[in-house]
Image (cartoon, helix red, strand yellow):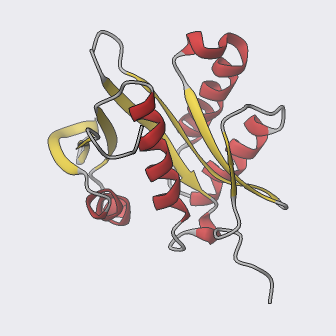
Amino acid sequence: MAPDPTRTAAFRREIRATDPADIRRIVESSGYFSREEIEIAVELIDERIARGDASGYHFLFADSASGMLGYTCFGPIPATESSYDLYWIAINDDLRGHGLGRELLTRTECIVGEMGGRRLYIETSSRGQYASTQGFYTRCGYRLEAHLKDFYSQGDGKLIYVRDLTGECAR
């Protein structure tokens, strides 16, 4: 039996030339995102490649011998002292439920803490399709901070989750 790729994942922060195509593949695999949202996910890695740290976008990738398994994109919220946004967390659809998302999120929280972040905010849709995503954030220790009704469209609100990262990781 082949080893579970989520248990043998290697994590990296450096950007590779193949990352934009891999990000597109992973985000498309979920079936959740519109064409526009997929383009935004790719634009963020392109922006990071073009501007480096000045872009404000940071990435953590999980890889296996067969390629990228998942990633996070995060960064400081402009004009705040120590608040960060998690812009994306995405896993190959066929790998969900194996713990890779939690591992990526935990590692991202530690990186944010090392960068001086004290709070991590996550936004998601209120649509029923996202119930498993909402449950994932709650199980990972995030609390629902705000619900902006009809934000994305009629009947599709924005949910904002937050977690205090103070003391979460050894620094």
Q: Is residue 72 above or below residue 50?
A: below
Q: Nearer the viewer, residue 43 or 149?
A: 43
Residue displayed at 80% across by 83% down: 2
Q: Is residue 153 above or below residue 63?
A: above
- Please identify the quarter of the rendering in which residue 146 is found: top left
Q: Is residue 65 left or right of residue 25?
A: right
Q: Percent position (x, y) of residue 62?
A: 66, 52
Q: Nearer the viewer, residue 43 or 12?
A: 12
Q: Nearer the viewer, residue 99 or 153?
A: 99
Total labels: the figure holds 0
The quarter of the image holding the C terminus is: top left
Residue displayed at 74% across by 35% down: 20
Q: Percent position (x, y) of residue 38?
A: 60, 39
Residue displayed at 38% across by 31% down: 85
Residue displayed at 18% across by 48% down: 144
Q: Percent position (x, y) of residue 25?
A: 72, 50
- Please identify the quarter of the rendering in which residue 96 is found: bottom right
Q: Is residue 54 left or right of residue 161?
A: right
The quarter of the image holding the N terminus is: bottom right
The single residue placed furthest to the front in the displayed view is 171
Q: Percent position (x, y) of residue 24?
A: 69, 43
Q: Is residue 104 above or below residue 149?
A: below
